[in-house]
Image: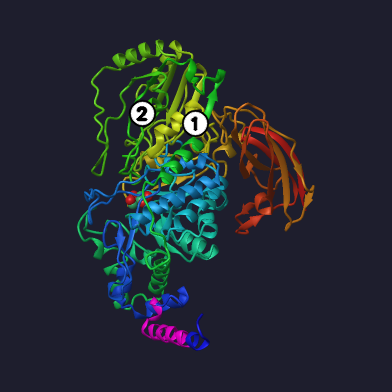
């Protein structure tokens, strides 16, 4: 036992050494001080040149800290489906490291299709761990731009057409990543809803639509998710590029929403020093500055927020107030990331990460149609399985633009199917068509040789012969990550499936009734063969575990529970942006050659307003091919009658709806109860209904659970552009609960006072 005197003397030694340390430690390094105190101290020690250096890039993906003060550099990385491989300091080409392979997680469309917030947290945490292990401080993602048109080449990186679903799904992702001391950079703020003309278009949109449809996921990401950074976009709004846009950044993000984090430019999205100074841009990356072409070495000094800014300050043309604000924000970020001593170390490709990738894939796959219960495959009655289609054998993690990855492994659908069924059945493959044989992105090679010189007829004949003698035919097709498909930089050229796939599918349907069409894509596609095919599966891009997730659904090891995060229209013209709005831009301007460069900006008017996706289809009663929220299961569910805990609520009240969901089939499974709110009568146009709650419920056969949804007036409000505020108008509303936007099972009326 220690004597009292010993305790006293021990204490004095510790406190003396603590005090000694404390006095020598500058405040900015002193962990006992608040972050704001440390930030202010660091700021006060920095020279003007150090401050300028800190707010722009020093290489393709990094920005300097303050070397003299020991404040580390920031390393960023794409994002959003896995950690991007290392590129060279000044070039996009590979750095040639051999330790930068990672796990690819399912694309964000697939994550969103799980309608499961837990999956989103798991995703973020695992991905954040990989980013951390790779010593990254800022992950360039997630993407939350709303799905406006099925042609957008980047839809696969986003979370669908609904602001509520996207908002709810993005928050846990952010929290999961940032629990590792790695910042997210939610992107692309804002209105980057197509790739065509992404650098050269100006979006014209009314305020109500902006606030109701396109901004909510960003707002949730910063106000609920606390994303430490946000990435601006390339497009223009009110004539200013989004990355330094007074209206979007100063007025809304940093003004109304009170954002304290860092605004990062998209790569090359700064183009004006004055605007960058005054309109809220904090950290500039990737600029193609005057006289320096893309990819040139050491362009960094000429960045808009580099020497040109320093010059303006030195000439006394601008003060340092804005600069100090930018540096303050960047320093704050440092204390959460690079200077955060409590962050975990991370890991890569752990068994847990593989399991997470596989499970998200399984939960995200959507069973669109299953006539005659072709799926799950009954392995005991199956001798021969034909796998047909290029996407069964094509690596999908290489390509698609900045989200392209270098993976530890990617299980192809054919390999997953062979591994699952190969012991009992004979699994054979025929290609059916040749699509894209490329397999390289910025020097990362898929290693596949997909060259095939056979004619379309020869390929088709082989597929038909194989289908004829098989018990099951699994067609694995869809889109891919080549240019003009699901890929950054360009949009798709048409809504249909490319490469003769429609003909192949129709031909297969004629010779084998047990046909399942598995679509690997991040977008909706036309399905002229819909009525010829009994079973359709939407399988997305699923990353490293793709083949295993798909096989597990085909076998029924996992029961499908994914729901569409966007509407599949029958034809392109049924989509509101194509019917009412402008795409890819104003017709007359398009004809006049606008959009070709930044001096010839093309306008894109979002005439369809708030009627995006199911809001449009439901309101105008345009039947979709498959509706938002749709997805089948191998079991059946029944919804009970919904009840409300009151019939009338006041403006600051809450109301709870309760509904029971029962598994009435023979297999364990999960259903997503979806709450939509409909405003019965309103002084302004409102969509027929809007998603305001969802809950995924896991049920054993015969099991029944109650689901509760509690809402307040925010779920009833519209954005009043004149008041510049949300308004909940008194009157009658209806809560509609079902398992897709076109399958409402039960309704309750209530009144807002
Ligand atoms: C993309 C961003 C990406 C950045 C860095 C840009 O072209 O739009 O999403 O994070 O490049 O690769």
Q: Is residue 569 visible?
A: no
In the displayed structure, 647 sits above or below 50; it is: above
Pinpoint residue 41: horizontal percent, then vertical percent: 40, 79
What whole-number distance in Å separates the C-alpha atoms at marks 2 and 1?
38 Å
The residue furthest left is: 297
Q: Residues within 10 Å of mark 1 (few under 14, many from 20)?
A: few
Of 283 and 235, nearer the camera is 283
Q: Nearer the viewer, mark 2 or mark 1?
A: 2
Residue 295, numbered label:
none
User: Going 35% across and 41% down the picture, which residue do you hit?
Assistant: 592
Whether the residue carrying mark 2 lies under 8 Å from ligand 1 is answered with no
Residue annotated with mark 2:
415
Q: Is residue 688 visible?
A: yes
In the displayed structure, 26 sits above or below 703; it is: below
User: Going 44% across and 49% down the picture, which residue do you hit?
Assistant: 143
Residue annotated with mark 1:
573
Magenta region includes residue 490: no
Range of the magenta residues? 9-29
Whether the residue carrying mark 1 lies under 8 Å from ligand 1 is answered with no
Pinpoint residue 642: horizontal percent, then vertical percent: 74, 39
Of 196 and 87, nearer the camera is 87
The residue furthest front is: 1
Dominant secondary structure, magenta: helix
Give the mark, 2 or 1, whose residue is nearer the N terminus: 2
Magenta region includes residue 15: yes
């Amino acid at each position: 036992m220690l004597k009292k005197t010993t305790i006293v003397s021990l204490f004095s030694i510790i406190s003396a050494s603590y005090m000694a340390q404390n006095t020598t430690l500058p405040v900015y390094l002193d962990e006992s001080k608040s972050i704001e105190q440390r930030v202010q101290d660091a700021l006060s020690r920095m020279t003007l040149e150090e401050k300028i250096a800190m707010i722009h890039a020093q290489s393709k993906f990094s920005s300097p800290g303050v070397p003299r003060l020991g404040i580390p550099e920031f390393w960023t990385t794409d994002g959003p489906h896995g950690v991007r491989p290392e590129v060279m300091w000044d070039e996009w080409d590979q750095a040639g490291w051999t330790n930068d392979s990672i796990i690819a997680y399912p694309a964000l469309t697939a994550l969103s299709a799980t309608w499961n917030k837990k999956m989103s947290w798991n995703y973020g945490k695992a991905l954040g761990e990989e980013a951390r292990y790779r010593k990254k401080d800022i992950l360039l993602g997630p993407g939350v731009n709303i799905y406006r048109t099925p042609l957008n080449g980047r839809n696969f990186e986003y979370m669908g057409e609904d602001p509520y679903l996207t908002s709810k799904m993005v928050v846990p992702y952010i929290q999961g990543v940032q629990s590792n001391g790695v910042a997210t950079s939610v992107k692309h703020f804002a209105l980057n809803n197509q790739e065509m003309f992404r650098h050269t278009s100006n979006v014209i949109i009314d305020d109500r639509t902006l606030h109701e449809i396109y901004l909510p996921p960003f707002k949730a990401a910063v106000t609920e998710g606390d994303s430490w950074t946000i990435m601006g976009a390339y497009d223009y709004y009110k004539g200013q590029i989004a990355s330094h846009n007074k209206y979007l950044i100063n007025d809304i993000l940093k003004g109304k929403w009170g954002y304290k984090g860092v605004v990062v430019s998209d790569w090359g999205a700064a183009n004006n020093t004055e605007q960058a100074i005054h309109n809220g841009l904090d950290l500039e990356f990737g600029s193609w500055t005057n006289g320096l072409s893309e990819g040139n070495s050491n362009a960094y000094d000429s960045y808009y927020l580099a020497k040109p800014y320093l010059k303006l300050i030195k000439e006394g043309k601008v003060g340092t107030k804005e600069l100090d604000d930018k540096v303050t924000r960047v320093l704050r970020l440092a204390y959460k990331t690079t200077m955060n001593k409590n962050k975990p170390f991370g890991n890569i490709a752990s068994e847990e990460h593989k399991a997470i990738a596989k499970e998200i894939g399984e939960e995200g796959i959507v069973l669109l149609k299953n006539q005659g219960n072709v799926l799950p495959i009954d392995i005991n009655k199956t001798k021969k399985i034909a796998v047909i289609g290029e996407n069964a054998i094509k690596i999908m993690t290489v390509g698609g633009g900045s989200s392209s990855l270098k993976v530890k492994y990617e299980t192809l659908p054919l390999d997953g199917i062979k591994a699952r069924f190969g012991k009992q059945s004979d699994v054979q493959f025929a290609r059916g068509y040749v699509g894209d044989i490329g397999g390289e992105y910025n020097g990362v090679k898929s290693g596949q040789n997909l060259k095939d010189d056979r004619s379309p007829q020869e390929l088709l004949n082989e597929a038909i012969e194989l289908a004829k003698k098989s018990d099951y035919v699994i067609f694995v097709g869809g889109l891919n990550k080549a240019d003009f498909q699901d890929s950054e930089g360009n949009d798709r050229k048409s809504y249909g499936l490319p490469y003769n796939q429609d003909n192949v599918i129709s031909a297969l349907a004629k010779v084998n009734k047990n046909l399942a069409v598995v679509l690997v894509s991040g977008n909706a596609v036309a399905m002229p063969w819909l009525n010829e095919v009994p079973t359709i599966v939407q399988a997305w891009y699923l990353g490293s575990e793709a083949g295993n997730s798909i096989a597990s659904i085909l076998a029924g090891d996992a029961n499908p529970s994914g729901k569409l995060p966007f509407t599949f229209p029958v034809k392109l013209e049924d989509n509101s942006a194509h019917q009412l709005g402008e795409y890819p831009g104003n017709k007359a301007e398009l004809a006049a050659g606008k959009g070709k460069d930044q001096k010839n900006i093309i306008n894109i008017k979002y005439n369809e307003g708030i009627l995006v996706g199911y809001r449009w289809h439901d309101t105008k009663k345009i039947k979709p091919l498959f509706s938002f929220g749709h997805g089948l299961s191998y079991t059946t569910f029944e919804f009970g009658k919904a009840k409300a805990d009151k019939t009338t609520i006041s403006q600051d009240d809450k109301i709870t709806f309760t509904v029971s969901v029962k598994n009435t089939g023979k297999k364990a499974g999960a259903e997503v109860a979806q709450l939509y709110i409909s405003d019965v009568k309103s002084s302004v146009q409102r969509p027929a209904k809007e998603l305001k709650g969802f809950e995924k419920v896991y049920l054993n056969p015969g099991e029944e659970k109650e689901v509760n949804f509690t809402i307040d007036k925010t779920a009833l409000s519209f954005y009043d552009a004149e008041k510049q505020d949300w308004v909940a108008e008194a009157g009658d509303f209806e809560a509609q609960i079902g398992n897709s936007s076109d399958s409402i099972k039960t309704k309750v009326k209530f009144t807002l006072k």
